[in-house]
Image (cartoon, rainbow, N blue to C red):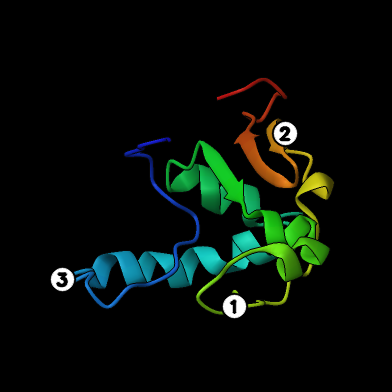
């Protein structure tokens, strides 16, 4: 298991997140960067908000596995406009059968 206090680019909202107005606003602002990571402004937006890592769920990379997984319901299938692998500022640091962790690089190509 992993416990983290890092800021998140995208979170699935829960009813018990009371008083999370700022979090919801940030999620709206960051959704564009998450859904189109190779876009021109995605790096700047993530860097500006102190994002170090982007976690990509397994179902996004391996949708065929959904039929074999026990889930409460289908995940929200948001439109992914570009691939994380196309974002030059991201480096894949972990891949667990499609569940991925990408690290932001600084502007000169090294890790933040």
The mark found on residue 19 in the picture is: 3
C-alpha separation, residue under disc 1 versus residue under disc 3 = 23 Å
Say which element carries label 1: loop
Image coordinates of residue 80 in percent, x first then y, are 74, 69
Figure quadrant of the N terminus:
top left
Q: Classify residue 5 as left or right of residue 73.
A: left
Q: Which residue is most to the top?
A: 110
Which is more toward the observer, 49 or 10? 10
Q: Which residue shows up at 72% across the image and 24% down it? A: 109
Task: Name the side, left or right, on which 28 lies relative to 63.
Answer: left
Please name the residue that numbered disc 1 is placed on.
76
Which residue is identified by label 2?
Answer: 92
Quarter of the figure that contains the C terminus:
top right
Residue 39 appears in the picture as rendered: no
> What kind of element bears circle 2?
strand
The image quarter in which residue 37 lies: bottom right
Q: Residues within 10 Å of mark 2 (few under 14, many from 20)?
A: some
Image quarter for residue 54?
top right
């Amino acid at each position: 298991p992993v416990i983290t206090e890092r800021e998140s680019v995208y979170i699935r909202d829960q009813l018990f997140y009371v008083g999370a107005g700022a979090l919801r606003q940030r999620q709206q602002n960051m959704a564009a960067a998450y859904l189109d990571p190779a876009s021109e402004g995605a790096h700047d937006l993530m860097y500006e908000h102190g994002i170090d890592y982007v976690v990509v769920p397994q179902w996004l990379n391996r949708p065929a596995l959904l039929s074999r997984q026990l889930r409460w319901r289908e995940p929200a299938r948001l439109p992914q406009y570009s691939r994380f692998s196309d974002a030059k500022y991201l480096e894949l640091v972990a891949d667990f059968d499609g569940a991925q962790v990408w690290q932001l690089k600084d502007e000169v190509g090294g890790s933040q």
